[in-house]
Amino acid sequence: MYSYIVRRLAFGALTVAGVSVIVFTVLRILPGDPLVAIFGAEGFTKLSEAERAHYMAELGLSDPLIMQYLHWIEDIARGNFGRSFFRAESVAEMISRRGPLTAEIGIMAVILSWIVGIPVAIISALRPNSLGDHISRFISIIFLAIPGFWSGMLLVLAALFWFGYRAPLGGASLLADPWTNLQIVIGPAVVLGLGQGAYIARMARSSLLEVIREDYVRTARAKGLSRRPVLIVHALPNALLPVITLSGILLGFVLAGSIPVERAFGTPGLGYAMFTAVSERDIFVMQNLVFLYAVVFVMLNILVDLTIAWLDPRIRYQ
Amino acid sequence: MTAADQGGTYPPSQVLSTLRYSRARRLARGLRLFIRRSPLSAFWGCVAAAIFLAAVSAPLLAPYEPLKSDFRAMSKPPDERHYFGTDQIGRDVLSRVLYGSRASLTVAVGAVLFGTTLGALWGLASGYFGGRIDIVSQRIIEFLQSFPDLILAMAIAMALGAGIGTVIVAIAITRIPFGGRVIRAVVLSLKEISYVEAARGLGASHLRIMLRHILPQCMAPYLILATTHLGVAIIIEAALGFLGVGIPPPTPTWGNMLADSLNAGLVPPWWLVLFPGLAITITVLAFNLLGDGIRDILDPRLRGAV
């Protein structure tokens, strides 16, 4: 097990290094001129030659690219995430203030997706190709097609229309004001959770149907157990392994999906900060946030892999 | 006695015509099978075709100019003059939704043609050659897959600046790893089959083996992947538009329309939210169900894999 952990972590470190190169390439090298990205094409033409040189030097953009990259890595290693070009707040402060809200949304969404997805999958797998199976599959396919930010907007509208209710706008931490916090978080979590629940239901159904064909399930049936306990007690634990893997990937997608969803709800989380950064073309904030999201995604996948290895000895001893 | 039996050959025109005939018949038979085996997917295939048709003939179908404001009819709810209502500066929502399908479909088709295809060819080469090329490719693909789709697309679209071309490139890059992974897996299993070995034994070049012997076998998984990716690309395009890094306004796209609706006052009018989103959902649903149907017909083993 230990050697597996070490190997997986080393792999993760390599991935993070590769990710940092991609982020740097995309956000620092691709834009022809970062000043154009910051000031816009029009604002850029208004800058004088001296001003351009001044900004380039101040932002450290006149150094060679490799030095810029190393400086960036050094800054991140020291926990210095820089500050926005447009705002006083440093990126590190922004992350610690807004991050928890988005993390809450992500965790709640994944829990919700299991609560909804697994029972639906069990109902489907108990009688494959029955009417119930067809209905639940069709509903999950519809949910896969609905963009979360759209259903979020509809939810906000419906709550306002029928109940005259609007979620509070200001941020509130879970500990200081749990009730306000819940009202802010619940909308995005439900929207994202139902969307992911559809993936979970599909995956769990096909995984259950595969496990049901195994010999040990037939043995359990042969010794006289009825279909339902066999499915839930014997088949389900093994069938859940791929679902756990999928959940890790989905958590990453929830983090990304919460960017437009937080905009739809006006949630003051990290996703909304990402939206602000992108609409202001704040490449430095973007660079650090994109890197942060990717690193979180990589770490989640490591965590999932280790969980699977812990649950399933077949993987551990490979 | 035919010409071939006498050691001669058929005249080329005759060969071509029999080939064409059999191809057309095979296609027709395939379609009949498709409709019989999964009528639901065939129905959604028709819906997808109708959406393509609507996009192409948007100028004929749209009752108004999508960009023209009518200041006498601003923020009007749906009525018999404007079936989907008008937005805050008096543009007809139905016309904008119709024109929006052009942007969405162009981006989706473009992204899949570039991204999924490039990924598939990369997967073909990396799976076929194996060794060091394969190891390096696998790592690069893994790095690309370490970003959630939307975030990578956002970053690229922002870095390159707004425009339809950049949106296509941004979404295409997020599609590459999936094409690479799936096709590589197929190629790895094909490589060992004896007819490929036979071709190699006969002295066929690598390129010839890849293109003539392996590529045709990859068509089924590629088609399935491409159809599903059309749906994914449409959702990403809408999200980019919604976040303000998609195709810049005033071009009507579904994502732009949803973003616009948030600027229409404190509470967005329901018709500005409902119709563009419905268009996205129906289009994505059509592609997903069509993809499912194609998968069931062409290769039931891929169920759940793609």
Image (cartoon, rainbow, N blue to C red):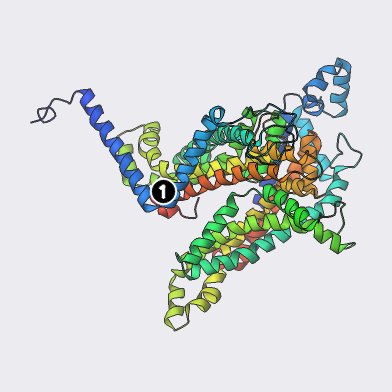
Q: Where is residue A308 drawn, in percent x and y?
A: 61, 63
Please rate how many residues cluster around mark 1, counting C-alpha atoms within 10 Å: few if below 14, some from 14 to 19, many from 20: few
Quarter containing the N terminus of chain A: bottom right
Q: Is residue A28 above or below residue B34?
A: above
Asked if residue B185 shows in the view, the reply is: no
Residue picked out by circle 1: B189
Helix, strand or loop at label 1? It is helix
Q: Residue furthest bottom?
A: A224
Q: Nearer the viewer, residue A186 or B133?
A: A186
Q: Where is residue B45 drawn, in percent x and y?
A: 46, 44
Asked if residue A137 shows in the view, the reply is: yes
Q: Is residue B259 left or right of residue B279?
A: right
The subunit carrying tag 1 is B
Residue drawn 68% across the image and 47% down it: A150
Residue drawn 41% across the image and 41% down it: B219
Q: Is residue A234 above or below residue A280?
A: below
Q: Residue furthest top?
A: A49
Callout 1 amino acid:
Ser
Q: Where is residue B210 drawn, in percent x and y?
A: 40, 36
Across the whole image, how many numbered discs are drawn on residues?
A: 1
Residue drawn 74% across the image and 34% down it: B74
Q: Residue furthest right?
A: A88
Q: Residue furthest left?
A: B1
Q: Is residue A242 left or right of residue B154?
A: left
Q: Quadrant of residue A164?
A: bottom right
Q: Is residue A234 left or right of residue B67?
A: left
Q: Is residue A278 above or below residue B14?
A: below
Q: Quadrant of residue A120?
A: bottom right
Q: Quadrant of residue B275?
A: top right
Q: Nearer the viewer, residue A42 or A244?
A: A42
Quarter containing the C terminus of chain A: bottom right
